[in-house]
Image (tube, rainbow, N blue to C red):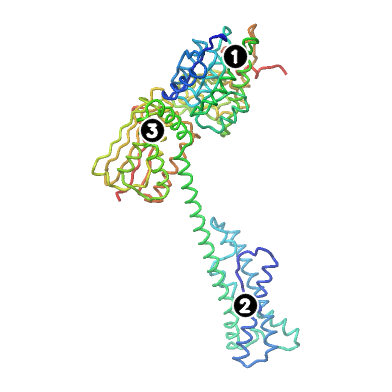
Amino acid sequence: MPIPSPIPPTLARWLGRQLLIIALITVLLSLFLVVTFNQRIALTLLYTFCITVCCSICVQGIRTGLAWLVNRIVIEPESGEASHWPGWPLMSFSIVAGTVLGYTLGNELANQITGLNSPGILDSSLRRGLTIMLISLVPGVGLTLYFLNRSRLEAAETRVQTAQRQAAENQLRLLASQLEPHMLFNTLANLRVLIGLDPARAQAMLDQLIAFLRATLNASRSSSHSLQDEFARLADYLALMQVRMGTRLRPTLDLPPELAALQIPPLLLQPLVENAIKHGLEPAIEGGELRVSARLEAGQLVLEVADGGVGLAATPAADGTHFGLHQIRERIATRYGSAARLDLRAGTAGGCIATLYLPMP
Amino acid sequence: MNAVHPSALIAEDEPLLAENLRAELARLWPELQIVAMAAHGQAAVDQALALKPSICFLDIRMPGLSGLEAAAAMAEDWGHDAPFPLLVFVTAYDQYALQAFEHAAVDYVLKPVQPDRLAQTVQRLKTALAKQQNAPSGMQAAVDQLRALLGAPAPAAPSLRLLQIGVGNAILMVPVDEVQYFEAADKYVRVLTASKEHLLRISLRELLPQLDAQRFWQVHRSLVVRADAIARAQRDEAGKITLHLHGSADKLVVSRLYSHLFKSM
């Protein structure tokens, strides 16, 4: 009878499916009626078919009408589910009203065809009317439950797929942002020069580059590592940058030993250090200090990247800074929820300070 | 300065790479004299203007002025006593810049510098220097190239209608329509209306993309004028253009990079 199906891909397929469902219900109900009430097969089939078709049309008609009204009055911000499912109270009403109306119409139609005079629900005794209603409602309610569940499952599956796709995209973007081509090629250019000038230093630089690349590639796979590892990777990165920038980059890393074993998402600080160099120190002719530190404050782990560079105001807004920050905020929100946050403020003596507050693991 | 002893300036902020470029050039082109090594954009401009080298190797990403901005600044202030230097841009990785270089037919070298590639550049430079000797027309060609490069990036930011200028504890709201011109002043921008002068705490470089390019014309690296405020453009015998404004005694000098904006219809 009623089929609250998702929107059909094509009309023909939809009609075919409706007919199949109606035929199935007709056969099953007729069999049930023939066996239970000992009625004649051919007539029962005809009546059941007419009633099923009419009920199906009425219930779906009422449901569609109500769903349309609901969508017009309440604009659902969420998924497309809203457009076909009017909600349980309205759906129940659709099924009951549609069944009464459909039964009456179908019965009348069958009477016209056969020339007989089988009474409709409204002309019957209370007991007979209730029996008819119960039997007629079973397919409607059953199908509604079936399709509702199916569309919910589909929606859940879509959500899972979307989430997975987003996670994969984020990983890729994370990787792309950390393997910034400009940094990579400039580092290689320096390496190429060093090989000729100072092979021992070139080897040390290559080792740092290898450690940096390995950490970057691993970061998208593992979910956490220790603060000690994080600071070691920053040290590699800073050493690479120091070869390039010389004394213009003056870094300090400050990790108290008692915090060394704490776990954080890998390379969480990396984009902050990169931003501090790219937007703070590289544009500054004299360069400046860069201080990365960790401390405990009111039960929170506080990680800070402070640079003495050109400062926040000098950073062009559209220069990619926001991707790095956005990506860190996304990562900590996924991991810690609202317990973590990232602040960016101007330093007292110029430059910029990025501070991460993380809950203690 | 002449074909026998060509001179060059290297502007590169990374010391190892600067030294390497110098060494590679010395090997490929022993006659080339490296007259200056600049570690940032402004130093490159100052030294180029003082020493008038025949070639400038300019790193694109440098502190202070970028290589491109440095070249533009040189073009604006270059005198008539020496031909404008041949420009070679140096960059590690910059897809957009490379396209722009190809488009403007500007020579460039990628880092790490490949000796073979650098040899080609050296060959081209020698040819160009010889040609320059016969027909000194370097300035106009360089200006055209720089115009093409400077015009290349077009960041489409929504255009600003109100300037919010901090004065003490207050924020002054000044409609951009009232502004006659903007002038770069170190890290700040002077904002001049018909009656007042304000100071905006951002650089002209940051402000520029936020202005409607149809209505606000850059006429010099440190000057942006509201086109409607211009009463007339006066050209003197040397070809230098000066702008006279409506309702203001200020006169603005147009640099040669932007002189093409002022032509009669």
Quadrant containing the C terminus of chain B is: top right
The kind of residue tagged 2 is Thr
CA distance for labels 1 and 2? 94 Å
Picture residue at 64% right of the left edge, 86% below the top = A30
Q: How busy is the neighbourhood of tag 3: few (under 14 within 10 Å), some, or many (20 plus)?
A: many
Badge 1 element? helix
Along the viewing direction, whichever of B265 and A130 lies nearer the viewer: B265
Q: Secondary structure at mark 3?
A: helix
- According to the picture, the residue beneath numbered tag 2 turns out to be A99
- State which quadrant residue B17 falls in: top left
Specify which label sits upstream in the sequence, 2 or 3.
2
The amino acid at mark 3 is Leu
Secondary-structure class at tag 2? helix
The subunit carrying tag 3 is: A
> Considering depth in this image, is A73 or B233 the residue closer to the camera?
B233
Residue topped by disc 1: B129
Asked if B72 appears above or below A261 in the picture, the reply is above
Q: Nearer the viewer, residue B33 or A319?
A: B33
